[in-house]
Image (spheres, helix red, strand yellow):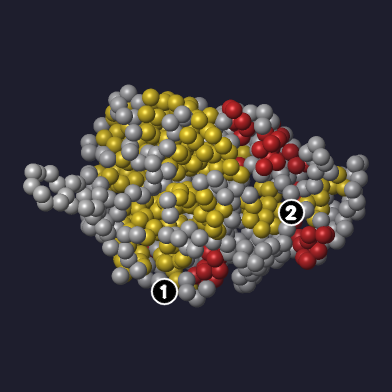
């Protein structure tokens, strides 16, 4: 999700088994073997504590990271552009004890991300002008002293360690300026930190893919920024690392792809397209409208394709193979949307790809949207759009008229990308049609065969080559509709009453159905005994879903806890609402936990709260 001045993500973990130290001595007593943790039959989440910044809707609690030795929690506070340091020695009562402020390293800078490994804290620092190079800095968790800092790429968005702690990886997103006139290259910084005082930076760039844009597009990689090269258009968002520390995978969210990075050589070895989700297929249904009254309308929509556009990602091992887990949030490029000159037709002032279906496809064209929400780049292509009746006749489309498909209760309210789905000539240029829907080189209409929506309203599991292994389909929205789903710390409120609500709204049932639904964004993995669990934060609807993903081919839902207690007040009242907008999550294993129980810490960006959840295991 894009917020002013900061790109948001959650903390990814690679889990390894804990081994007991081997005993020494000269006798024949066998050394103790590995400590084995009991495997639970299931678990339930319980909120046992939390910390509130007292700040609403300013991203005052986002990305948490934990240091077991000092029992300190490090939480990115975007409102301060810093990291809040919390004492977590009593998980029921976290206490703020200090702040890590990067302005001493770079005046006016903001911290976007934090990670911890064995007492060392790494932070990603964004420059005051986000298109300028950023920094990565190392601190000691115990006393917060600065060890070192190095210059890296533009807009460092996520930072993580390799499992051995010898390398820090940073996703440098390299978003454009708001007017899209400056567009830095995206990259991944590969930083050798074995000598903490003198880190060595190498850059895994995408310049080798420049000139291959047409091939990448044909494979399904979205490269569509105005005049951008591949290196400028590819925007690293989030990083997961293999258990052996040799390979990193990076989400390229807006590009609907992953990058694979060889860590030893600091090179991007491949860009892996993720494909699209067929919302016309059974099991992939969605609710596409926010104005269809009191009805929750989860159904198939042939011709609608979901772009996965994942944000957070984590890796784990099953059966000797590496698997990648993604939270398929969705994200649109929307630059210059606050500039009236852009909407009045000046394409040099921004680039917005999002448009509602009913405005995109209209038999009368889209001229009436000029000066309001009509992107000038779209207006330069044609004067209107149509729907292919061969695909969309089921909702009323006929030649030259999208008709009933434009209705608010049908597809009219759905936000989609105008940059994809229209018919093209062999050279990639738009194939033009007459207002009657007849192919005509002199025509003024685009013909949309498919509509591409944002996010897949799901989480997915992929293999190491980026091939889809499993997807939750429509299970999240269907669960939120079901009587099994309950809201609040006491689980007393039916989820359906506030289905697809927004995190900053009250009494807002169905308000997010036209956009990205419940919006799975944050993700953490935890291994307990022989089971691996995925914890998925639903940014808009709120709450954390728990899935057992031990078998990547057949994950099962285990629990859901939404600690928002009050849903009617608009805007929500921090005194009564509870936790709003889960962003970052970190799993704390029982062996590292201050209370000896496995914990999940959640940063909630809208309520500005850090929630401590305990995993109550059943056997």
Q: Is residue 48 visible?
A: no
Q: Position of residue 91 (x, y in %)?
A: 26, 56
The vertical placement of 282 against 121, above or below, is: below
| The image quarter in which residue 526 lies | bottom left
Q: Position of residue 370 (x, y in %)?
A: 76, 44
Horizontal arrangement in the rendering, residue 411 relative to residue 109 (left or right):
right
Q: Position of residue 269 (x, y in %)?
A: 54, 34
The vertical placement of 127 against 541, above or below, is: above
Horizontal arrangement in the rendering, residue 595 relative to residue 163 (left or right):
left
* Quarter of the image with the C terminus in it: bottom left
- Label 2 near label 1: C-beta < 8 Å? no
Residue 455 image label = none
Of residue 137 and residue 39, the one placed in the foreground of this image is: 39
- Residue at (31% x, 69% y) in the render: 618
Q: Write down the residue under mark 1.
A: 492
Q: Position of residue 67 (x, y in %)?
A: 28, 44
- Residue at (37% x, 33% y) in the render: 167
Of residue 568 and residue 33, the one placed in the foreground of this image is: 33
Q: Secondary structure at mark 1?
A: loop
Residue 450 image label = 2
- Residue at (84% x, 43% y) in the render: 431
Extreme bottom residue here?
Answer: 483
User: Badge 1: few (under 14), some or many (20 or more) residues near its Cα, within 10 Å?
Assistant: few
Closer to the camera: disc 1 or disc 2? 2
Horizontal arrangement in the rendering, residue 330 relative to residue 441 (left or right):
left
| The image quarter in which residue 98 lies | top left
Q: Secondary structure at mark 2?
A: loop
């Amino acid at each position: 999700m894009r917020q002013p001045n900061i790109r948001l993500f959650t903390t990814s973990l690679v889990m390894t088994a804990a081994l007991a130290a081997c005993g020494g001595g000269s006798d024949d007593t066998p050394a103790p073997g590995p400590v084995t943790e009991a495997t639970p039959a299931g678990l339930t989440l319980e909120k046992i504590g939390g910390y509130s910044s007292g700040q609403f809707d300013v991203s005052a609690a986002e990305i948490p990271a934990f240091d077991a030795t000092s029992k300190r929690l490090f939480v990115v506070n975007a409102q301060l552009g810093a990291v809040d340091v919390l004492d977590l020695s009593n998980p029921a009562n976290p206490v703020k004890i200090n702040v890590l402020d990067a302005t001493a390293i770079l005046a006016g800078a903001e911290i976007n991300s934090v990670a911890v490994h064995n007492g060392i804290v790494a932070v990603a620092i964004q420059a005051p002008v986000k298109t300028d190079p950023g920094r990565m800095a190392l601190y000691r968790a115990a006393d917060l002293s600065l060890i070192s800092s190095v210059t890296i790429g533009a807009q460092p968005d996520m930072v993580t360690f390799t499992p051995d702690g010898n390398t820090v990886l940073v996703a440098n997103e390299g978003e454009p300026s708001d007017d899209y006139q400056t567009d830095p290259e995206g990259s991944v910084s590969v930083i050798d930190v074995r000598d903490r005082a003198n880190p060595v930076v190498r850059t895994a760039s995408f310049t080798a893919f420049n000139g291959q844009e047409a091939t990448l597009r044909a494979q399904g990689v979205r490269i569509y920024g105005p005049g951008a090269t591949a290196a400028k258009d590819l925007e690293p968002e989030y990083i997961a690392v293999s258990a052996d520390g040799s390979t990193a995978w990076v989400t390229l969210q807006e590009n609907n792809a992953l990058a694979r990075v060889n860590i030893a050589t600091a090179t991007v070895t491949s860009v892996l397209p993720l494909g699209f989700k067929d919302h016309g297929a059974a099991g992939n249904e969605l609710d596409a409208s926010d104005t269809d009254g009191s009805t929750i309308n989860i159904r198939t929509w042939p011709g609608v394709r979901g772009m996965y556009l994942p944000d957070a990602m984590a890796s784990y091992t099953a059966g000797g193979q590496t698997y990648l887990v993604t939270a398929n949030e969705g994200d649109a490029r929307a630059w210059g949307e606050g500039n009236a000159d852009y909407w009045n037709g000046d394409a040099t002032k921004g680039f917005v790809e999002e448009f509602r279906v009913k405005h995109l496809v209209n038999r009368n064209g889209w001229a009436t949207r000029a000066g309001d929400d009509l992107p000038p780049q779209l207006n330069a292509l044609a004067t209107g759009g149509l729907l292919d009746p061969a695909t969309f006749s089921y909702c009323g489309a006929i030649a030259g008229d999208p008709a009933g498909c434009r209705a608010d209760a049908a597809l009219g309210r759905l936000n989609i990308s105008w940059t994809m789905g229209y018919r093209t000539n062999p050279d990639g240029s738009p194939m033009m049609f007459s207002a009657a829907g007849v192919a005509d080189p002199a025509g003024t209409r685009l013909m949309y065969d498919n509509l591409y929506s944002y996010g897949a309203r799901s989480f997915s599991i992929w293999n190491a080559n980026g091939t889809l292994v499993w997807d939750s389909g429509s299970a999240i929205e269907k669960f939120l509709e079901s009587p099994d789903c309950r809201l609040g710390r006491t689980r007393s409120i039916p989820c359906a009453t506030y289905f697809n609500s927004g995190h900053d709204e009250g009494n807002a049932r169905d308000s997010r159905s036209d956009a990205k639904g419940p919006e799975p964004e944050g993700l953490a993995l935890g291994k307990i005994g022989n089971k691996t669990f995925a914890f998925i934060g639903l940014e808009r609807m709120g709450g954390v879903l728990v899935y057992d993903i031990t078998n990547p081919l057949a994950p099962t839902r285990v629990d859901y806890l939404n600690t928002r207690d009050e849903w009617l007040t608009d805007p929500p009242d921090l005194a009564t609402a509870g936790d709003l907008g889960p962003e970052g999550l970190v799993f704390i294993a029982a062996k590292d936990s201050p209370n000896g129980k496995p914990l999940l810490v959640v940063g909630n960006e809208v309520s500005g709260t850090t929630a401590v959840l305990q995993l109550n295991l059943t056997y």
